[in-house]
Image (cartoon, grey):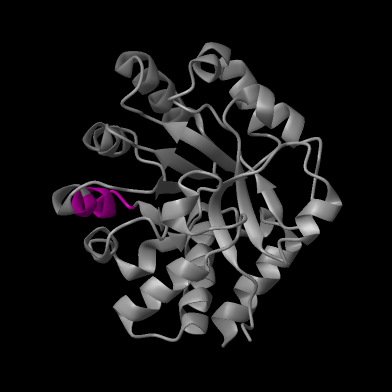
Amino acid sequence: MFPFPPLDCHAHIAPDVTAAQTRTLHGAQVFAMTRSLDEFDAAIENPQAGLLWGIGTHPGVPAALAQWSEQRFQDAVRRSILIGEVGLDRRGDATRQSEILATILRAAPPALISIHSTGRTKQVVDLVEKHPHPGVILHWFTGDRDDAVRASDAGCFFSINAAMSDEQMTALPLDRVLPETDFPSSRSRTQARTPGDTAALERTVSRLTRQDASDVRRGWYRNLGALSTRVGVRQRLPTELQELIDRAEAR
């Protein structure tokens, strides 16, 4: 029996999710990313226990890039301390994507920022180095060890899932790692049946670190506590999540 519910720092949930549906997640604490500013505007009007909605402009979604507005972004960050999913993607115009991500990194107030880097990992690290922000979490990071070192030196955290290789996971500092499912993407590889289903990831990290799975999960809450404290948003996290972090740090 785990003393803490699952933690999922990057998943996608429909903005019209119901309370009955969120109850099926068994208390999981989920960072629910949106793909566009329109989606965020809809989601933030639907508060649900266990969900923290992110402000998204997905780089691989042309409609999301077309919606981008710095003014709308500034309005949104008054309503959430989570930004995501944003970043760069091999699909589409690298210049436009880079302009948007650079603006987000420069303009974002204290917040957690979940960054996508598929196919353009080195360019993402370049931008993070050029425009440092204390809340960066590199989602499903697939860079090589040199990229991981550069990102770590820039202060980044990393969210990992069970689709990643042992080599990719062990290249990342254990105290900078957070769990994710990226639900519903690649479910056959992540083995996540729902948002918050990090069981396969917990087994992998337990094997790699020789820790009990319950200790792995507690460590993730402690890492989130360290990050949210560094960024200055800990007291703005949902109350239940704050209490879970406090418990994790106290044990």
Magenta: main secondary structure equals helix
Q: Nearer the viewer, residue 207 or 211?
A: 207
Residue at the extreme front of the image, as rendered: 188
Q: Position of residue 34 (x, y in %)?
A: 60, 35
Side of 170 where 48 appears, left or right:
right
Magenta residue check for 160? no
Above or below residue 216? Residue 173 is above
Of residue 195 and residue 146, the one placed in the foreground of this image is 195
In this view of the protein, which residue sits in the foreground, 49 or 188?
Answer: 188
Query: Total label count?
Result: 0
Picture coordinates of residue 142 (x, y %)?
A: 28, 47
Toward which corner of the image does residue 250 lie, by quadrant? bottom right
Residue at the image point whose x is 48% and y is 16% from the top: 62
Quarter residue 121 falls in: top left
Residue displayed at 38% across by 20% down:
97
Which corner quadrant holds the N terminus? bottom right
Magenta residues, as a range?
A: 148-155
Location of residue 248 in the rendering, given as x and y in whole percent from the top left corner: 58, 79
- On the image, the x and y values in percent for residue 218 come to 53, 77
x 30%, y 76%: residue: 208
In screen coordinates, is 223 left or right of 128? right
- Residue drawn 19% across and 54% down? 149
Residue 15: image quadrant is: top right
Does the magenta segment cover residue 152? yes
In the picture as drawn, the residue positioned furthest to the top comes out as 66
The C terminus: image quadrant? bottom right
